[in-house]
Image: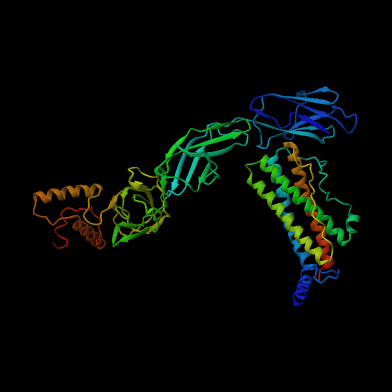
Amino acid sequence: TAVISPQDPTLLIGSSLLATCSVHGDPPGATAEGLYWTLNGRRLPPELSRVLNASTLALALANLNGSRQQSGDNLVCHARDGSILAGSCLYVGLPPEKPVNISCWSKNMKDLTCRWTPGAHGETFLHTNYSLKYKLRWYGQDNTCEEYHTVGPHSCHIPKDLALFTPYEIWVEATNRLGSARSDVLTLDILDVVTTDPPPDVHVSRVGGLEDQLSVRWVSPPALKDFLFQAKYQIRYRVEDSVDWKVVDDVSNQTSCRLAGLKPGTVYFVQVRCNPFGIYGSKKAGIWSEWSHPTAASTPRSERPGPGGGACEPRGGEPSSGPVRRELKQFLGWLKKHAYCSNLSFRLYDQWRAWMQKSHKTRNQDEGILPSGRRGTARGPAR
Amino acid sequence: MSCSLAHLCLLTLLSPPLSSAASISPAEPISQAYSLALYMQKNTSALLRTYLQYQGSPFSDPELQLSSLPPATAFFKTWHALDDGERLSLPQRAFLALTQHLQLVEDDQSDLNPGSPILLAQLGAARLRAQGLLGNMAAIMTALGLPIPPEEDTLGLAAFGASAFERKCRGYVVTQEYGHWTDRAVRDLALLKAKYSA
């Protein structure tokens, strides 16, 4: 048998190591002659070894690389016949860097999940243990998060016993054999990082025969219904075989929206997400939920494509932000002041559009939206 | 009076049959044990591969042995001539030792390779299967009226204070021997299956 010294040393990358293999015991008269070293199974060049005395073989390694496996590099002293006499595991690496980019969110104010990034250079070659700690800012002792890897390798989940209306201090400690590092402290109030579930029951349906519109309806997420908050929603939709989403922003406190300016006879995928805005009367936004499962619907067929859109169409008479409608609104406003047609309204406009689309189907030729000179010849809606 | 009679009846129901006459057929437990051993055999090389992957350099030294584990190898003639009692009690002792050693390796590896859930899961599964096989073999022994060897502590005091390399080595020996004993158990049970098939 033999003994290697040092046993299981921990070393910095680039450092040197002097090791010895001392034989003793059986067979009696065993010498250092014929012994050799391997590192991770590869025989080391003989010029690195030196016989110190009759029973000791020395090894000089310089400029060590990071350990090939986290359980340590295997430095082995072999007898002349190749059998293993002794071994030592070398742990070569770097101390951990300060973890950065801690971000946290609370689902329905019930828990807290945090994510972080390990320090800039990542690879330490040694097993590095991360510990997420938190405490109430003005009071109490440090707590340690226990449920790790919930949303990726550097994450932790705190499932309960969280206070509201009071700031928490959160930080991450990284430790390995060569040292430890602590991230900067993140201070937050649970109420500022609330997210919720995506809106359930998203339904998309056609709007009568209108070939460029679809109606989206949803339910506000039930989990937060007892807490006073205004929900903000965002809708995104895309054509079936496209990857470009159109986003409808600023959908405040409604649970329905009409998408306009769509292509006829096309399948659309629609998703909705929710932001619990202004919990308990705060003026701040929360964190957007995940998008709801995609719901699909198709617009009715037609020959005439419509212009692009990006906002919810009004159900009745409210102004919206499409360019044509904006101009129309201005025109109607002017008309009201200067002309006789005071019954003109958006409702009337919508009715006219629906009628136009229906009657276009029976015609052979396509014209623009407001064909000049044709209005008088066709039958319009009664006044 | 009737109370003590009932008590006596209950006692005879609970105690195992004293005679060695095979009132329970051994064919069923033998078949179950054989199926389990075959299933274990399919996974032993994967376990060894995973183990070596996390330790580093190949431990190709056949000399490595642990005195606390009985070796699986035996001379063919001797092995073939074993009676039922020895044929079952030798693997029984071996797998008992293996369950204890596998627990030790699992503990060692959770320290040496903390970020390797796959390896730890495979070691855990191997240990549970070995325990299952012990149960199956005990059932066979009961069916054949053989005494089940008592559980003993096979690891003794040598377990603590080992260096990282020593722990890697003994884990290698254990996973290897686990493979060897599984191969042998398949052969032992195949012989018994042939002998006691209906």
Extreme residue toward the bottom, this view:
B2
Quarter of the figure with the N terminus of chain B: bottom right
Residue located 84% across and 29% down the image: A23
State the residue in front, A55 or A362. Answer: A55
Task: List x then y, in percent, for residue A181.
Answer: 55, 31
Image quadrant where residue A33 sits: top right
Decide: is A74 above or below B197.
Answer: above
Image side of residue A118 versus residue B128, left or right: left
Between A369 and A66, the one nearer to me in the picture: A66
Q: Can residue B141 be seen in this view?
A: yes
Tell me the residue at 35%/42% (across/down).
Answer: A284
Residue A300 appears anywhere in the view:
no
User: Quick check: A215 left or right of B49?
Assistant: left
Q: Nearer the viewer, residue A381 or A58?
A: A58
The image shows residue B26 at horizontal and vertical percentages of 80, 67
Q: In the displayed structure, would residue A125 be above or below residue A362?
A: above
Compared to A270, does A119 lie above or below?
above
Residue most extreme to the front:
B1
Q: Where is residue A346 in the image (x, y as percent from the top left)?
A: 20, 55
Residue B59 horizontal side relative to residue A380, left or right: right
The number of callouts visible is 0
Image color mode: rainbow
Residue A230 in picture, x, y percent from top left: 33, 50
Quadrant where the C terminus of chain B lies?
bottom right
Specify the quadrant of the image occupied by residue B31. Answer: bottom right
